[in-house]
Image (tube, rainbow, N blue to C red):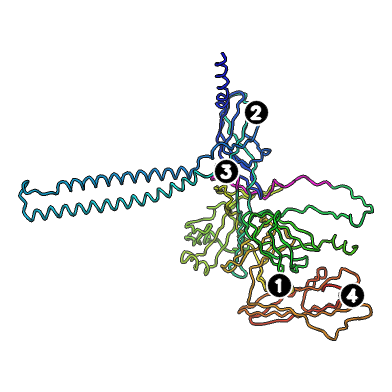
Amino acid sequence: MMKKLLFILLLIPLFIHGNDKKIPTAIQEVTVYLSGAQIIRTANLHLKSGTMEYTFTGLSHKIDESSIQLSGLQAVSVLSVAFNIDYLTAKESNPEIASLETQIEQLDLKISLLKNNIAGLEEEQKIFNTNRLISGADQELNLEKIKQISTYYRERTTAIKNEIFATKLQIAKWSIEKASLTNQLTSLGNAPKKEQGEIIVKFDAPIATTLNLKITYAVQDAGWIPNYDIKSEKLNDPLKLTYKAHVYQKTGIDWNQVKINLSSGNPNLNVTKPLLGTKYLNFVSRYSKRYESTTKKQKYFYNPTVKKVIGQVTDGDGSPLPGVNIVIKGSTKGTQTDFDGYFSLDVQNGRELVVSYIGFNRKEMPIYSSVMNIKLEEDVAMLEEVVLTGYATTLQGRAAGVSIRGVSSNNPYSRPQQPKLPLYVIDGVPVDGFMEGDLDENEIQSIEILNRENAQVLYGSRANNGVVIITTKKSNLKEGITNTRFEIKKTYSITSNGDITAIELNTFQLDAKYEHFAAPIVNENVFMTTTFTDWEQYNLLPGEANIYFEGTFAGKTTLDPYTEQNEMTLSLGIDPNITVTRKQIKDFKSKSFTGSNRILDRTYELVVKNNKVTPIHLKLMDRIPLSQNKEIKVDDIEKPNAIYDTKKGLLTWKIQLDSKASKTETFSFQVKYPKYRTISL
C-alpha cells in the first residue's frame, strides 16, 4: 500500500505539468514612446468549459507587470494574471542557427559527392595501371599501334589526374567555407542564454470557446529620438525638412516585421496633478530663508546614440562663460568650458549632464544631442544673499496657373487633342502614364513643380512637358488629447541590440528667408542663417538636425520647437568671405568725474566688409547695457541707422552690401554711477 501511495505522489507533478499549456504568441503591433514601448501580442486559444491555466512564453523579461492587459475574452473570465521570468528555458530557436546548420549540411553533401568522384577516378587509374603492360605474347603489335596506345594512356592519365586535382581544390574551398560556418555556429551556440518572460493566466470559460486573444503590456529599454535633415539647395529656395525617428530597443526580444506606431507621449512621467497650498509669511532667520522652485517641463529625452557632446555655455545675455564645470551625472568624469565658453566631452554610458558655475543656478540635462548649447540663469537667491550678506492646398500658390492634367480647350466643338502631360516623379521614381487621381489626396505630403531648365537637366528629354515631383506621406498623424501619434505605413524589424533603425515620418517644404548674421560682441564670425515660420503645424519635437547647404554637409544643430518666438532661425554655417570687426573708440576729452559720480563715455565702431562676388543682406546686432539700479544712469544714447529695442537694449542694423564693399556703423552711450562703486561694463 505504501509503495502505491509513493508512486501516486511521484506522478502528481507529471499530471500538473501535463495540464500546464504553453502557448506561443506573435507581436502584431508596437507603440514606441520617447521612453518605453507598448507591445501588442496575439494568440489563438481553444478553451474547454471550466477552469484552465495557460502560460504565454517567449516574452521580454522587462515587462511592467502592472501594465498587462487582456482583451478579446468574450464571455470568458480571467481569474488571475501573473508575470514570471524563466531563467531555465533556453532562448527561442534562432533562425540564424537553423540557416547555418542547413548550409553546413549542404556543403557536407557536396563534399561527399566530390570525394566519391575522386574515388571513381582513382579506380579507373588503377585499371589503367594494371592493363597498360603490353605483352608481345598476347598480340603482335607494330610500332604505330604502340604509339596510339601510349598516346591514349598518356592523355587519359593526364585527364584523370587533372580532374582529381581540380576536385580536391573545390573540396578544399568548400571545407574552408564549412569551417567558417561551423565557427559561426559555435559562437552562436556558446552565446549566453538570456532569461525570458512569461505570462501565466487562469481562465474560467462557461462553455467551450475559441478566443482571438490580445495581450498588451509595457516594456522599458526602448524609445525613439526625433532627428531631422534640413536641406537648402541654394539661396531663396524653400527648405526641405525631413522628419525622422531613430528607434531603438533592448528588451531581449526582436521585433520582426511588426506595425510600428510612434508616440510623443512618455508614460514614465509622473502625471499626478500638483497640489497648491496656502503661503504663510512669518519672520525667519536670514540664513534659513528658503527659495521656491518649480518643476520644469521635460522637453528633452535621453539619446543613447550620442557618444560625444560639444557645445557652448552662455549667460542670459548670450555672453560665453569660461570655466563652467560640466560633469556626467553619477561619475567624476567631466570637463570645463574654455575662454569662449566652448566644451567637448565624451559621454559614453552617460545619461545626464550636470552644469554648475558660481553665481548661476545648477542645471541638470539629459544627453539628448551631440550639440548642446546651454544657457545658465543667474542664482537670484545667491545674489540676494550677497547683498544681505494636402493636394490642392499644396498646389495653391506654388503652381498657380499650371494644369497637371494636360492641355484643355474651352471650345466644346473643337477636336480633342492629345494632352501633353508632364513627367511625374513619385518619391524619387519617375512614373510613366501617371494621371491625377492615381494617388489619394490624403496620401500626398507635398508637390513641387520644376521649371523646364532644371527639369531637363535632371530628367533629359522626358521632361520636355515639365516635371511634377510628388512626395507621399510615410506615416498617418493622429492627434490625441495629450500626445501625437505617428502610424507608420510599412512594417519594420527592430533587433534587440540597441542599434538604431531610422524611420522616415514625413518630408515638408518650408518657405524660408535667408540672410547673413553677425553679433561681434559675442562672436566674430559671420553666419548664413535661414528663418521660417508656420512650423508649429508639423508636430515637431526637440531633436538633432543635420544641415545641408548647396549639396554640402554644413554641420549639426538642435531644432527646438518649444521656442517662444514666432520665427525659427537656423544657422547654415560660417561664411569666411565676410568680416566684421568691433572696436572701442577712445574719447580723451570726456570727463571722468563730476561731483560724487564717475562718468564713462563709450563709443564703438563696427566695420563690415563683403569679400564675396555677390551682394549680401546682413543683420548686424550689438547692445547697450540697461540699468537695474537707480544709482546707475545710462544716458546720451546715439544709435544712427540702428533699430533700438528699449526693453532689451538690443541694436539691430539691416545692411545691404555690394560685392567687395565695406560699411561702418557706430553707436555710443554714457554711464554715470557713484565714484566709490564698481560696475561691470
Residue type highlighted by circle 1: Asn
Circles 3 and 1 in contact, beta carbons < 8 Å: no
Quarter of the image with the N terminus is top right
Among numbered discs 2 and 4, the one appearing first in the sequence: 2
Query: With respect to residue 561, does 2 lie above or below?
Result: above
Under circle 2, the secondary element is strand
Give the percent coordinates (x, y) of residue 655: 71, 77
The answer, for residue 560, to whether it is visible in the render is yes
Q: Secondary structure at mark 4?
A: strand
- Mark 1, Cα crowd under 10 Å, few <14 / some 14-19 / many 20+, is some
The residue segment tinted magenta is: 250-275
Q: Residue 202 location, x and y as percent?
A: 63, 29
Pointer 1: what residue? 523
- Residue under the point 53% across and 39% down: 92
What residue sits right under mark 4 in the picture?
A: 673
Q: Say which label, 4 or 1, has the lower sequence index.
A: 1
461 relative to 288, above or below:
below
Residue at image position (56%, 57%) is 471
Number of the label disc, if any, that sits on residue 77: 2
- Which of the two discs, 2 and 4, sits closer to the camera? 4
- Classify the position of the C terminus by image quarter: bottom right
Q: Residue furthest top?
A: 1
Q: CA distance from mark 3 to mark 1?
A: 50 Å
- In terms of sequence position, does the residue under pointer 3 or pointer 1 come before the other? 3
482 relative position to 231: left or right: right
